[in-house]
C-alpha cells in the first residue's frame, strides 16, 4: 500500500471516529489522542477500524509506533 493510500484509509477511519475534527489541522507528528481529544476507547476503535479497512492488525506492543497520524500512516503503509 502506498503512503497516500494508507493516509486515505487512516483519514477515513479517523473521520468516522471524530467527524468534528479538521484533519488538515492535525499535526502529523503529535500524539493523536491529544491532537484529536481521543479517549482510549476511540483509539481502540481506530485500531479496529484500520484492521477492518486495510487488514492491518496493530498489536498493543506497536501502539507507540502509531501514536501520531504520521506514524499510523507509515505503519499501515508498511504492513498492508
Image: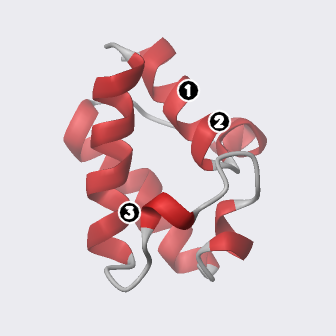
Q: Which residue is drawn at 69% across and 35% down?
A: 62
Callout 1: SS: helix
Pinpoint residue 38: horizontal percent, then vertical percent. Answer: 59, 78
Q: Residues within 10 Å of mark 2 (few under 14, many from 20)?
A: some
Q: Mark 1 points at which residue?
A: 75
Q: Relative to 50, does residue 5 appear above or below in the rendering? A: above
Q: Residues within 10 Å of mark 1 (few under 14, many from 20)?
A: some
Q: Residue at x 67, y 49 (%)?
A: 68
Q: Relative to 48, does residue 22 appear above or below in the rendering? A: below
Q: Nearer the viewer, residue 76 or 15?
A: 15
Q: Mark 3 points at which residue?
A: 14
Pinpoint residue 4: horizontal percent, then vertical percent. Answer: 34, 25
For the residues labelled 3 and 2, say whether their Cβ atoms are less than 8 Å apart: no
Q: Which residue is drawn at 46% across and 59% down?
A: 24
Q: Is residue 46 left or right of residue 74?
A: left
Marks 3/2: CA–CA distance: 14 Å
Marks 1/3: CA–CA distance: 15 Å
Image quadrant containing the C terminus: top left
For the residues labelled 1 and 2, say whether their Cβ atoms are less than 8 Å apart: yes
Marks 1/2: CA–CA distance: 6 Å
First along the sequence among labels 1 and 3: 3
Q: Mark 2 points at which residue?
A: 71
Q: In this view, does 7 lie to the left or right of 68?
A: left
Q: Which of 22 and 13 is in front in this view?
A: 22
Q: Is residue 30 left or right of residue 73?
A: right
Q: Relative to 39, does residue 15 appear above or below in the rendering? A: above
Q: In this view, does 19 lie to the left or right of 67?
A: left
Amino acid at each position: 500500500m502506498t503512503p497516500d493510500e494508507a493516509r486515505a484509509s487512516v483519514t477515513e477511519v479517523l473521520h468516522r471516529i471524530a467527524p468534528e475534527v479538521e484533519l488538515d489541522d492535525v499535526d502529523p507528528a503529535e500524539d493523536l489522542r491529544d491532537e484529536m481529544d481521543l479517549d482510549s476507547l476511540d483509539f481502540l476503535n481506530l485500531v479496529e477500524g484500520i484492521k477492518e479497512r486495510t487488514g492491518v492488525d496493530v498489536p498493543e506492543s506497536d501502539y507507540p509506533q502509531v501514536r501520531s497520524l504520521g506514524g499510523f500512516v507509515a505503519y499501515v503503509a508498511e504492513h498492508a
